[in-house]
Image (spheres, helix red, strand yellow):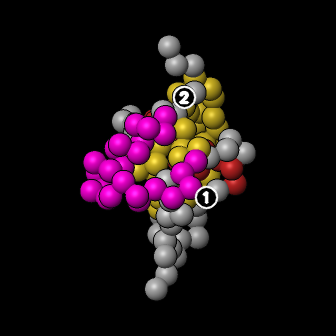
Amino acid sequence: MNKLRMLMADDNEVMHIPYSVKIFRLNPFDWWAGYDLKSVKLAYLRETGAARDAFYEEEELARDAMQTLRVYPNPYAKESRTFQEELARMVARGQEFPCHFASRYVSS
């Protein structure tokens, strides 16, 4: 049984995140959400068609980083949400995990 913890997305809304949902950085550009690194990596390979060597320094994101890293809807956006707020929104929408969470924009 997964435990739930309360997260405040804003002053008016309380959302629940299954305690075991985590964010994993798979390479310098991609973050995925899921329950464990193995299933996240398999989903990434299946959905992207990338080679197995697409992973570089993959790691679970630390809990304190969930409050500091931010998601922007596009490279020019002024509004953003923390990773924790975005994960809470995904759970509230009924998102299935593992799944893509965020990508780093690379300017050319």
In this rendering, would 50 be left or right of 93? Answer: left
Q: Identify residue for label 1.
A: 70
- Residue 56: where, in percent of width, then height? 51, 58
Between label 2 and label 1, give the one nearer the viewer.
2
Q: Which residues are magenta?
A: 36-59
Q: Magenta region, mostly helix, strand or loop?
A: helix
Label located before the other in sequence (2 or 1): 2
**Residue at image point 49% right, 81% down:** 107
Front-lying residue, 94 or 56:
56
Query: Which residue of the protein is positioned furthest toward the bottom in this rendering?
Result: 108
Task: Give residue 4's quadrant in the image.
Answer: top right
**Residue 36 visible in the snapshot:** yes
Residue ID at (36%, 54%): 52
Q: Kindly state the secondary structure of the residue where label 2 is placed.
A: loop
> Label 2: which residue?
20
Residue 102 appears in the rendering: no
Magenta-span inclusion, residue 3: no
| Numbered mark located on residue 53 in the image | none
Residue 11 image offset from top left, x and y in percent: 66, 41
Give how far across and how far down residue 81 sits, in percent.
59, 55
Is 28 placed left or right of 39 in the picture? right
Q: Is 44 part of what is drawn in magenta?
A: yes
